[in-house]
Amino acid sequence: MKHLLCIAAALFVFGSFSTLNAAESFDIFRPSLKRLDDQPRSAEDQAKVDLGRHLFYEKRLSLNSSMSCNTCHDLQRYGVDGEGFSKGVPGELLGRNSPTVYNAYAHIAQFWDGRATTVEEQAKGPILAGKEMGMPSSAEVVKRLKAFPEYTPLFKAAFPGSADAINYEHVGSAIGAFERNLATPSRWDAFLDGKKDAMTSAELAGARLFVTKSCTTCHAGTLVGGQAYMKLGLVNPWPNQKDQGRFDLTKNEADKMSFKVPSLRNIEKTGPYFHDSSSVKLEDAIQRMGKHQLGLDLSAKEVADLAAFLKSLTGPLPTDYIKPRPFTTTGSGAKFE
Ligand code: HEC
Ligand code: HEC
């Protein structure tokens, strides 16, 4: 009996050690992701978020009132439209895949090449981009917003100190304020926070593989990416060399084929994959990452385990937060998708 107890105690100690070690090796992903909108906000900050939500869904911010941010970044569909390449107002295909807006606020910078620093700065781009929402100028956007009576009280509440509350800077900062709460923690975060049974053994095997195969060289931190620029095709050249990534921005040779390492949060839901949409299936994307970034030929089992881990990064959508709200002041009436 005593003997048996000893074995049980040894198993217990060993068991807890191994979980401890496994947990420790995941420090590279800490801190866990938290939703921010559970925390109380000042009335002014809340008003900014509310205005930003309206603007995110506002189709009249596009030239022919046909598309909003949500058209290409559908919040009900994990912030993407599922297309290889989205079409803007003129109907032409855009040059890069539309990334998700979920968790984007926490990236080092915005866009595949990082050309905008913050979500606030980024949000001012697509409205005026000819191939996207196609508005002719920021002055025209402001003129429109001033003509919709429902927006006047919203801007005033969000920017109470401003004599000229409806201006283009404020459009960007309100949309950004809304985007800063598009965080999607998942079971993985519960696990990182100590809930040991939050992940299945296959998912954990995948997480360990993700570390041991060195995916974490590039995809690390809270968002499992989003924190660095790296060459696509580091070991084996990427077949599609048309888009040279950051090089087009910096003209620095070292930046050829350099792209922002994407966050892998919700990756299961945001295909097709890569800036050039060249992988439709997640398993294919994983296989190609092994080959081009690491020079590895991953087995089918390894790919399946890695995919199981990546799928555990899918968090529930913040359904209430993203729900379009009616305007309280009646105006010309906004149509939502
Ligand atoms: C016609 C489709 C389309 C519309 C409309 C659109 N976007 Fe995008 N968005 C894209 C594409 C494509 C990219 C990537 C472009 C690139 O990296 O060069 C992008 C990138 C982004 C990013 C960067 C995400 C990341 O991971 O780097 C954010 C944030 C974003 N858009 C928010 C918005 C907001 C806010 C609006 C509305 C003001 C908007 N988008 C309107 C297609 C669109
Ligand atoms: C040397 C850096 C590096 C390594 C190592 C690496 N990746 Fe990536 N990963 C990137 C970059 C850069 C991109 C974006 C490429 C682009 O422009 O499309 C990317 C994209 C991805 C995508 C598609 C993301 C999207 O939103 O379309 C997946 C999935 C992915 N990586 C998984 C992995 C896995 C799994 C591993 C390990 C087997 C891995 N990566 C190793 C740098 C890396």
Image (cartoon, grey):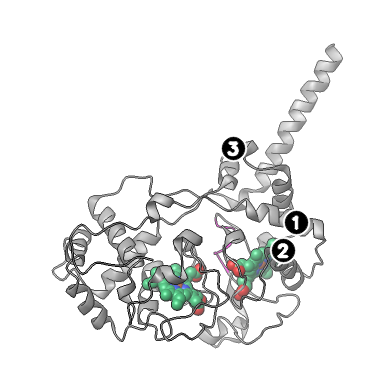
77 vs 232: above or below: above
Question: Which of the two labelled residues, at mark 3 and mark 2, occupies the earlier sequence position?
Answer: 3
Quadrant in the picture for the C terminus: bottom left
Residue type (three-letter) at the residue carrying disc 1: Ala
Query: What numbered label is drawn on residue 190?
Result: none
User: Residue 321: percent from the left, percent from the top?
Assistant: 38, 52
Separation of marks 1 and 2 at Cα, in angstroms: 7 Å
Magenta span? 223-228
What residue does disc 1 label? Answer: 304
Name the residue nearer the viewer: 31 or 178. 178
Under circle 2, the secondary element is helix
Secondary structure mostly seen in magenta is loop
Residue type (three-letter) at the residue carrying disc 2: Glu
Asked where in the image residue 297 lies, by quadrant, the reply is bottom right
Q: How many marks?
A: 3
User: Residue 118: percent from the left, percent from the top?
Assistant: 41, 68
Asked if marks 1 and 2 touch (Cβ < 8 Å), the reply is: yes
Query: What numbered label is drawn on residue 283?
Result: 2
Q: Is residue 199 visible?
A: yes
What residue does disc 3 label? Answer: 194
Q: Residue at point 57% right, 84% down?
A: 247
Question: Which of the two labelled residues, at mark 1 and mark 2, occupies the earlier sequence position?
Answer: 2
Camera-near label (3 vs 2) is 2
Q: Is residue 257 left or right of residue 170?
A: right
Q: What is the crowding at mark 1: few (fewer than 14 residues within 10 Å), some, or many (at least 20)?
A: some
Q: Residue at point 43% right, 70% down?
A: 71
Under circle 3, the secondary element is loop
Separation of marks 1 and 3 at Cα, in angstroms: 25 Å
Question: Which of the two labelled residues, at mark 1 and mark 3, occupies the earlier sequence position?
Answer: 3
